[in-house]
Structures are given as C-alpha cells and as structure tokens.
Image (spheres, coloured by chain):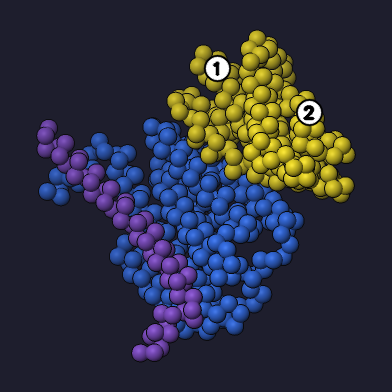
Amino acid sequence: MSSMQEFFAMGGYAFYVWTSYGLTLIVLLANIIIPVTQRKRFLRSLALKQNRQ
Amino acid sequence: MPWLVSAFVLITVAGLYGGLVLAPTDYQQGDSYRIIYIHVPSAWMSLFIYVVMAVAGAIGLVWHIKLAEIVAISSASVGASFTFIALVTGSLWGKPMWGTWWVWDARLTSELILLFLYLGVIGLYGAIDDKRTASRAVAILALVGVVNIPIIHYSVIWWNTLHQGPTVTKMDKPSIHVSMLIPLLLMALSFKFFYVIAMLQRARVELLQRERNAQWVKNLISGSK
Amino acid sequence: MSLTQAFFAIIRRDLVLALRRRSEIANPLLFFVLVITLFPLGIGAEPRLLQAIAPGVIWVSALLAAMLSLDSLFRSDFDDGSLEQILLSPHPTSVLVLGKIIAHWLVTGLPLLVVAPLLAVFLGMPNNSLGILLLTLLLGTPVLSLIGAIGVALTVGLRRGGMILSLLVLPLYVPVLIFAGNAVQMASSGLPVDAQINILISILLMALVLAPLPVAAALKMSIN
C-alpha cells in the first residue's frame, strides 16, 4: 500500500507529473473524440437531407 | 484500424509502465524528470508531423492527389496538439527545475514559434472557403515553413546562448540510462501510432465533407439505416 | 518584350502608380514614427532604459510597419485584374513578381532608412551604432518584403485577410528580428558585428532566390 502511495506522490513532484500526464490525456482524447462526433453529426445531417428528398 | 489501436494501447501501456514504475528515480531531478516520457516524444512529433504535412502537401500540389491533400490538413491539428503538449509539459517541468513557469529557453521558444506556424496553417485553411484551393494554400505555406524551421531554430538557439548563457542545460542529459531510454523510445513509438489513428479519424471527416455529393456517401447513409 | 524589359517595365509602372498615391508611402512611415514615440511614453524616458531597448524597439516597429504596408502589394492589381494579366504573360511569373516586390520595397521599405536616424536620436542611441542600424535596415527590410509577399499572395483573394496575414508572416520574421536587432545592440556596445551582417546577407540572398517561387504559386492559386 505504501508503495502505491509513493508511486502517486512522485517524490514530491506529484502535481507537476500528474498534471502533465492528465493534460496530455485530455488533449489526445479530444483529438479522437472531436473528429468522431463531427463525423457522426455530419452523417446525421446528410441522412436528414436525403430523407427529405 | 483495430490492429492499429491495439498496437497503440499495447505500446503505450508498456511505455508508461516502464517510464513511471520501472525506470529509476533521477539522482538530480527526482521523479519530476518522468515528464520526459511525454514531453520529449511530443516535441519530436511536433517537428515530425510538420515535415509529414509539408511532404504530403507537396505531393498533393505536384500530382493533384486528393488523398495527400487530406493527409496534409488532417495532420495539422494533431501536430498543433503535440506542440501544445510539448509546451505545457515543458512549462510544468520547468517550474520545479527553474522556479518559474516560463523561461525563454531556446527549445521552448522555438516550440512556441512552431505552434504559431501550425496555427497559421489551420487558420489559413479555415479562411478559404473552397477546400481544394485551401489545400493548395496550406501546402505552399507548409513548404515555406519547412524551409524556414531550421533557420528559425538555429537563430533562436544563437539568440539564446547570447542572452542567457548555459543556464538551462539541466534539460540536456549527457547520458541517459538504458532503463530510462527504452520507455522513452516506446512512448515515441506510441505517439507515432496515435498520430496515425487521430489523423485517419480527422481525414475521414474531411473526406466525407468534400465528397458529400458522391454516390458512395449516399450509399453509406442509406446502408446505415 | 524580353524578360529584362518586362521586369523593369513592371518596376517602373509600380513606382509611377505609387507616386500618384503618396499617402500610401507616408502611412507606414508615420506608423513607424508613432509606434516608437509611444515607447518612451509607455515605459518612461529614462535614458539608460531607452538606450537598452532602442535596437529592439526600432526593429519590432519596422517589422510591424512592413507588415501593415504589405496589403498594398497585390491588392489593387488583384482588384482591377492586372494581376491576371501578369500571370498570363509568357514570362516566368516569379521574375515579374520579384519586380513587383522590389518596387514595393523601394516605396515602403527604403523610406524607413530615412527616418531611422531621427528615431535613433529620439531613443538616445550612441552614434557609432547608427551606421549598423542603417545597414541592418538596408539588408533586413527587403527580406521582410520578400517573405511578406508570400503571405499576401496566399491571402489576397480573402475578404478578411488582415488578421490571418499577421499570423502567417510574423513567425517567419523571427530570424531577421533576432540577427538585425542583435547586430545593432552589439554595435552600440562597440562589439564587432561581422557575423550578424554576414548572416543577414545570406538570408537576403536566399530570400531573393527562393521567395518568388512560392509567391508565384500562391498567386496562381489565389486567382482561380
């Protein structure tokens, strides 16, 4: 258990290390999520247009 | 695609485990150096993607290959993201090392200018309505940028050594232990995989929007219902 | 018409046109002087401080003045269609475009050299660095016009190209700013500046040879 705590403490640099990793995760996730949702939304709007015709 | 994603996950887990758990603590910087496993690979990717973008743009420009044009512009946002990550993690690493969030260090400064170059590419693409024309504009700009990047980089290094002296050598490691190097290379590889995955996602949107009137798009929509 | 004749004809035409609209020459100059006047007002008129920031201030203002004047490079020719005629001519576009850039520099870049001594006096620069300041302006401002021309050529077809132009062009101006600003700074402390001047010369030569190519390509793209 103490080794887990030590791991998260990062030798006193926890804030810097985990903020870096967290921000990276957020930015990288956004790079996947944004295009996927854009694509879905675009396909939906195209489908609506086709149905109307 | 599933093959790509599983390779990416495998390499990333191995790299993170090696970097955060297995690699020993640095005797000078303590555990704060572990930011290296995302900072350095992102900085590498930021340059690498710019070059890929310029090469893809040139191919699109010369042979009018639509796919190359799409690869070029789809790379821009991913590259800007990596540049942003390199800047932020560099700043977060610098705070405990230098005592301030921002130092006009040669690498951070040229990374910042690189971010401006990426934003210029993205802004130019957004400003031109016709996407074929926009792709050509982006390709020309990326080529100009790729010629200029070495000049900018070396002028910034020269400027930095002149104004600051070697105060920021903490970030250079004269030698790096193998147990630290292997996770670093794994993370670099993992970011390359991520780039391909993210770029392909972006390219799919780009392709759909350009080909909205093509038959295959119509089939795709009626097939999905 | 031979290529050299066409080249000089374009320079002459642009110069004549510019002389008819003198305000376009005066505006960047006024801007240059005005911005530099603002610095002592903003940070205080302490002579030491002014002397220390003078090279940087003059060069940053020159950068901004050069950028503001860029719009007139292709704008009127784009609007009245003469740009299309230039692209249609049998001569290589890059050479003709180089003529336009040189004419533009003669009316917007060169006059900066005339007012620079005045500003050097305003900011209390030592006399021995004035020569170097003029030399760096002479070598640096053509590079600003050449690089800027790429940005204008890419954005000339856009209605709101102004903001995007600065985003495209300013990062590319960084090396000129670093070497020119530093040369002036070194000169005012009496140090040799051969290295910086040589680098500026090589940047200028490179820009002269390379920049017209992307400008020509970008203009072709903007026209259709």
Q: Amino acid at mark 1?
A: Ser
Nearest to N terminus: mark 1 or mark 2: 1
Q: Is residue B149 left or right of residue B60?
A: right
Give the residue at mark 2: C118
Q: Tell which chain the image draws in purple.
A: A
Task: Kindly identify the residue that appears in the image at 61 percent across and 26 percent down.
Answer: C69
Q: Is residue C34 above or below residue B158?
A: above
Per the image, the residue denoted by label 1 is C76
Tag 1 subunit: C
User: Which chain is yellow in the rendering?
Assistant: C
- Shade of chain B as shown in the rendered figure: blue
Q: Determine the residue positioned at 56% across, 52% down.
A: B112
Residue B114 versus residue C143 in the image, above or below: below
Rendered residue at 28%/48% (across/down):
A38
**Quarter holding residue B217:** top left
Would residue C6 be visible to someone looking at this image? Answer: no
